[in-house]
Amino acid sequence: MNKILLTLAVGCISAFQAQAWDPTGHMLIGEIAWNHLDPAVREKVAPLVAQAANHQNMGRPYNFTTVGCWMDDLRADKDYAWSKWHYVDGPWTSSGTPFVEPEAPHLLWAIDQCIAQLKKPDASEKERTIAVSQLIHLIGDLHQPLHTTTWDDKGGNGYLVFGIPFSDLMAKQGGNLHTFWDKAFRFDGVNGQNVEQYPGLSKIEERPSAPREEPLKSIADAIEKNYPPDSLFQLETLGTHRDWARESHVIGCLAGYPDVPHPRDTGGVKLDPEFVHRANGIANQRIALAGYRLARLLDELFK
């Protein structure tokens, strides 16, 4: 706990269905994980994710980088049944403790199901494809602080904000705190202004056909350079997804919300550049951690 507080102190780090990281964020996590996967595990996982249903991906096969978008892509299906799998909202507290795991189904329960399926010796190839494709997405979700934290506002979906130059809001998305955190890795506070550092790859046709393609390659490499594995105390032990949820929850409580009263019945809160700058560092570190941990988890499951 003290290490997390210290990290935050120095700055290292409506409602509609929550997305968790925008498509670019999920793909960056995949890029980083791919960089750190054991080559033998790559050979096992790549053919599986290529079989994921692609009717919401313009018929294009998914690859390890793009399959992180799969669970969100399928929200367009009328029979989508995984809405509650993307978050595990622990109530906001001023200290970040305790983290109270709610009744299933939720994000931690969903990860449990994926891991159990991948450990089943008699699981079919289709079952393994679904489980690993879900797992890649869900580990990303778990590292977005407002997917583990709610101030009685659906993880920030009910917290209106302005002052952010959103350029790629999707249908039904609004200017709220949750949406900001989904994209916080791309926004920064610079010289007293909130700016978008680079555009997101919001269109399916912009997605890479394979890992390690530009522009995601360079962005992922820059994140790794800023947050290499040996600089992150959180990686001293692998831990479990419940440990990672508690970690995200502390960050969500201590740094996920502006230090002002909740604007429940007002016009919202203008996010100041200092808050946006700190969120940028936290979000990029969370994306790096998600990628490193995903690689280690898949190495364990597939070796």
Image (cartoon, rainbow, N blue to C red):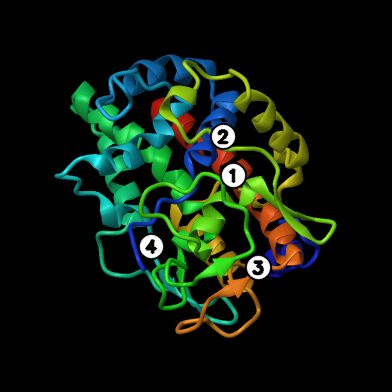
Give the mark, 3 or 1, whose residue is nearer the N terminus: 3
Disc 2 from disc 4: Cα separation: 22 Å
Residue corresponding to mark 3: 271
- Crowding at dot 2, Cα within 10 Å, few <14 / some 14-19 / many 20+, comes out as many
Q: Nearer the viewer's eye, disc 3 or disc 4?
A: 3
Residue corresponding to mark 1: 287
Disc 1 from disc 2: Cα separation: 7 Å
Name the secondary structure under disc 2. Answer: helix
- Crowding at dot 1, Cα within 10 Å, few <14 / some 14-19 / many 20+, comes out as many
Disc 3 from disc 1: Cα separation: 21 Å
Q: Amino acid at mark 2?
A: Leu
Q: Where does the image place residue 295, in percent across and percent down from the top left? A: 52, 33
- Crowding at dot 3, Cα within 10 Å, few <14 / some 14-19 / many 20+, comes out as some
Q: Is residue 238 left or right of residue 4?
A: left
Name the secondary structure under disc 4. Answer: loop
Identify the image quadrant of the C terminus. top left
Residue corresponding to mark 4: 88
Name the secondary structure under disc 3. Answer: loop
Q: Nearer the viewer, residue 58 or 258?
A: 58
Q: Nearer the viewer's eye, disc 3 or disc 1?
A: 3
Give the mark, 3 or 4, whose residue is nearer the N terminus: 4
Give the mark, 1 or 2, whose residue is nearer the N terminus: 2
Q: Nearer the viewer, residue 169 or 94?
A: 169
Whether label 1 touches label 2, CB < 8 Å: yes
Q: Amino acid at mark 1?
A: Ile
Q: Where does the image place residue 94, in percent across and percent down from the top left? A: 58, 82
Residue 28 numbered mark, or none: 2
- Crowding at dot 4, Cα within 10 Å, few <14 / some 14-19 / many 20+, comes out as many
